[in-house]
Image (tube, rainbow, N blue to C red):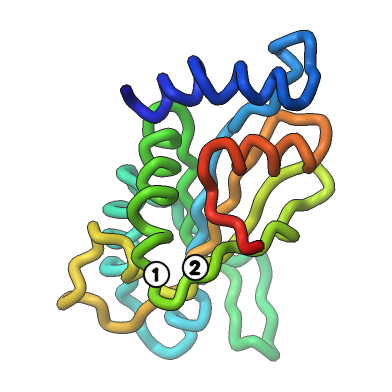
Amino acid sequence: MSFKENYVKHILPELQKELGIENPMQLPRIEKIVLNMGIGTYVAAGNKDFSSLRSDLALIAGQLPRIAHSRKAISNFKLRKGMPVGMMVTLRGERMYHFLEKLITVILPRVRDFRGISGRSFDAAGNFNFGIKEHTIFPEVPQLDVVKPHGLQITVKFKTETKDHSKALLDKLGFPFSR
């Protein structure tokens, strides 16, 4: 049984009973997952070629990232208008469920001295944000080609009413929260 089938057939009905929601359309649902990688310091250090980071993020997500450019110049940060400052990927549908399954079952258990992710990283809208310090924990990234490990921010966006419903859904999915 795939992760999505388990989510739809088992987890959502259990969550509906647990939260006491009568209408199944009011259940919290995962809308999208956004992966962000900041490359501003990498480019500012004189590295003009960030194609290796772009290919690493593409391997992690399964699709090419979009390059974010600076909108204005800030002299204190040696930032010029139009410089690349980040990359982002938005995952929806099958890729989103595949990435979430891979994150929960393979990637987070591989982290050395992993004690769980803080459950306080929910914003007011119920979305969950957390960071990974090294993108090299993903098995798709070739370890020999990595020049410098980079951080990665992961945002899980929900359609929900409260952040408690979002946390309950992630708990049911088996997300490793710290106790």
Q: Amino acid at mark 1?
A: Val
Q: Do the residues bearing badges 2 and 1 touch, measured as CB atoms within 8 Å?
A: no
Q: Nearer the viewer, residue 123 or 40?
A: 123
Viewer-nearest residue: 34 or 16: 16
Q: Quadrant of the N terminus?
A: top left
- Of 37 and 79, which appears nearest the observer? 37
Q: Secondary structure at mark 1?
A: loop
Mark 2 lies on residue: 132
Q: Position of residue 80 (x, y in %)?
A: 58, 77
Q: Mark 2 or mark 1: which comes first in sequence? A: 1
Compared across the picture, whether 120 is left or right of 110 comes to right
Q: Quadrant of residue 108?
A: bottom left
Query: Disc 2 vs disc 1: which is toward the camera?
Result: 1
Q: Is residue 170 left or right of residue 168?
A: left
Vertically, is 147 above or below 51? below
Q: Position of residue 55 (x, y in %)?
A: 27, 59
Q: What residue is rendered at 28% in x and 66% in y? A: 51
Establish if 95 lies above or below 114. above
* Quarter that holds the C terminus: bottom right
Residue 173 pos. (x, y %): 53, 38
Amino acid type, residue under disc 2 in the picture:
Ile
Q: Which residue is mark 1?
A: 111
Q: Is residue 155 left or right of residue 48?
A: right
